[in-house]
Image: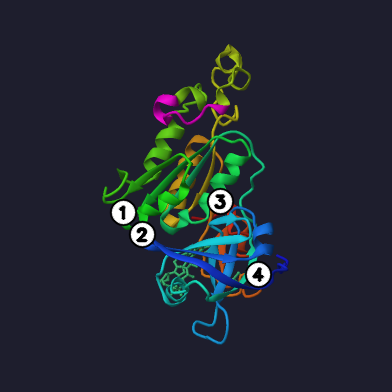
Amino acid sequence: MDAQLIPASLFDCPVVESRPVGAYRLISFVAREIAALARPGQFLMVRAAGQKLDPLLPRPLGVHEIDSDLVKVLIEPVGRGTISLAGMRVGDRLSVLGPLGNGFDMTGEGPAIVVGGGIGAAPLAFVARSLSARGRDVRCLLGFRSRGQAVVAELFRNLPVEVYTEDGSMGKKGLVSAPLSEMLCALDGTDSFSNNTSSAGDFPSEASSAETISGDSASSDDENSCAADTGMFPEIFACGPDPMLAAVDRICRDCGANAQVSVAAHMACGVGACQGCVIKTVDGYRRACSEGPVFPSTDIEW
Ligand SMILES: Cc1cc2nc3c(=O)[nH]c(=O)nc-3n(C[C@H](O)[C@H](O)[C@H](O)COP(=O)(O)OP(=O)(O)OC[C@H]3O[C@@H](n4cnc5c(N)ncnc54)[C@H](O)[C@@H]3O)c2cc1C
Ligand code: FES
């Protein structure tokens, strides 16, 4: 496989907002070029600017939101790098490389389900807003360990969000895989996504136009066609821990829906040079930073 390095620019960015959101920290910084270029699902390599050399390597963070010249990231402080970044305050400066990675393929049509787990929800607000701006019906399923993490769902303002927590302390108790499976299984091959509103709430209406479902799905020729064949399945956009992504892949395979997943890999350079982020795929090893982090779920050897 050719080593294809990504041209990326390094920016010195002043922090203009830093506030806790439950167990996470929301940081906004000025980065006009990144704000103009970033696509949903892309990431940045971020470290404190200046002389501070510990930690030396930047850490990958997803683009959470773009607001004019501002770029927002959401940080879960889990180790040296993220604890240092979560300690950044207004007036501090960040050294930011990016935007990096492929991002999600947003060119599809029809309804979409955005599935996030834990800090994997961070880049999905940008994804869900972009899908919605493209006129697609979007529903967000966000799963967290507990309320401390789940309050981050407040950042998905004006988007249809269902929250799940493992301990039931906020939203519904359970994992996001269960409602995803329920929604997709309800499309059992003869029903369209849109006429299953009893299981999917008031979500899908885009596909409910007579033209889209048309009498065709009820015609005798198509009686046995499945939702995937008729393009009625929503497209899945997922980011979260590997076990959640593997479950999303299984569920989608079972019913024939397509899922794009953003994988978390340890990264050192972020631009395809060090091979530190390789993941196993059906085509061999691929670099999550330069060939991902978004892959069709069926490409990954789970
Ligand atoms: C494309 C991409 C986007 C990301 N976006 C965000 C984001 O928006 N916000 C955010 O807070 N984090 C995000 N992460 C994860 C974040 O980069 C890592 O948690 C961080 O690099 C850990 O560095 P650290 O020095 O804080 O912790 P370390 O001391 O390096 O590790 C602390 C613990 O976390 C584990 N860990 C480290 N990196 C990862 C990883 N990538 N996946 C799973 N476990 C890991 C380690 O094994 C260890 O147990 C993203 C990762 C990737 C690859
Ligand atoms: S992090 Fe260096 S090749 Fe991906």
Report the mark closest to the observer, 2 or 4. Answer: 2
Residue 194 among magenta residues: no
Q: List the residue tagged with mark 2.
A: 22
The spot of residue 130 in percent (x, y) is 60, 45
Residue 214 location (% of width, % of height): 60, 17
Q: Disc 3 or 2, which lies upstream in sequence?
A: 2
Callout in the foreground (4, 1): 1
Asked if the residues shown at circle 3 and circle 4 are in contact, with their CB atoms under 8 angstroms apart, the answer is no
Location of residue 121 with respect to 113 vertically, above or below = below
In the picture, measured across the screen, residue 37 lies left or right of residue 75, that is right
Q: Is mark 4 on a helix, strand or loop?
A: loop
Residue with the mark numbered 1: 147
Secondary structure beneath dot 3 equals helix
Q: Which amino acid does label 2 sit on?
A: Gly
Task: Give the distance between the C-alpha atoms of the residues marked 3 and 2, in whole angstroms.
Answer: 19 Å
Circle on res. 272: 4
Would you say the residues marked 1 and 2 are in contact, meaning their CB atoms lie under 8 Å apart?
A: yes
Under mark 3, the amino acid is Phe
